[in-house]
Amino acid sequence: MAKAVFPGTFDPPTNGHLDIIDRAAAAFTEVIVAAGVNQSKSRLFDPDERIAMLTELTEPYANVRVGTFEGLLVDYCRAEGAGVIVKGLRSAADYDYELQMAHLNQAMTGVDTMFLPTRPENAFISSSWVKEIARLGGEVASFVPSGVYARLQKKL
Ligand code: PNS
């Protein structure tokens, strides 16, 4: 299949993100892991740090590269010549939220969204909770790749 964009905030990337990257790399000819850099959520890692972590994680995949985008995701997809957005789904709540964005993105430019259900062992992992648990001194080693864990420990 064609070129796909896997967008996210990736603050920080988790095992769930890595699983989606792994499976998208097998399903698509080319995958761009695109970090949004103009979102309003409070950030722990700056864009350069998020790019560094994603670059490390995607290094084993010859058909995956990392990018950043500001503004509308569909504009980025168009600029990159990507016809598909890939999103991971952990739950029905994710689906409800993502479906509206998928419809809007499709209506704006015709770019389609393909959903990959997350593996069950990752279904409860989110970057937001990982950050909160780590900030409060909890153990997050089993929720994030080892390189991300090292950076989290250094930062907090
Ligand atoms: O990892 P996240 O926080 O769930 O990623 C959300 C992201 C960056 C994919 C989403 O907020 C997004 O697409 N933002 C770009 C702005 C945009 O296109 N907004 C209109 C969506 S219909």
Image: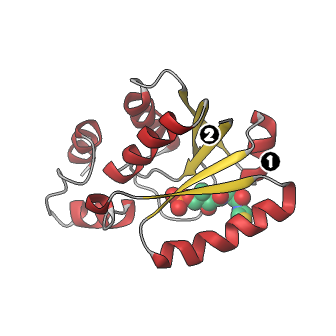
Judged by depth in the image, the label closer to the viewer, 1 or 2, is 1
Kind of residue sitting beneath label 2 = Thr
Q: Is residue 95 above or below residue 149?
A: below
Which quarter of the image is occupied by the N terminus? top right
Which of 156/116 is in front? 116
- Left or right of 125 in this view: 140: left
Q: Which mark is drawn over residue 3?
A: none
Q: Is mark 1 within 8 Å of ligand 1?
A: yes
Kind of residue sitting beneath label 1 = Asp
Marked residue nearer the N-terminal end (1 or 2): 2
- Left or right of 129 in this view: 65: right
Which residue is labeled 2 in the image? 68
Local packing at callout 2 (Cα closer than 10 Å; few below 14, some 14-19, many 20+) is some
- Left or right of 28 in this view: 117: left
Place of residue 100 in the rendered image (x, y in percent of width and height, measured from the top left): 68, 74
Which residue is labeled 1 in the image? 75
Which residue sits at x=69%, y=47%?
A: 84
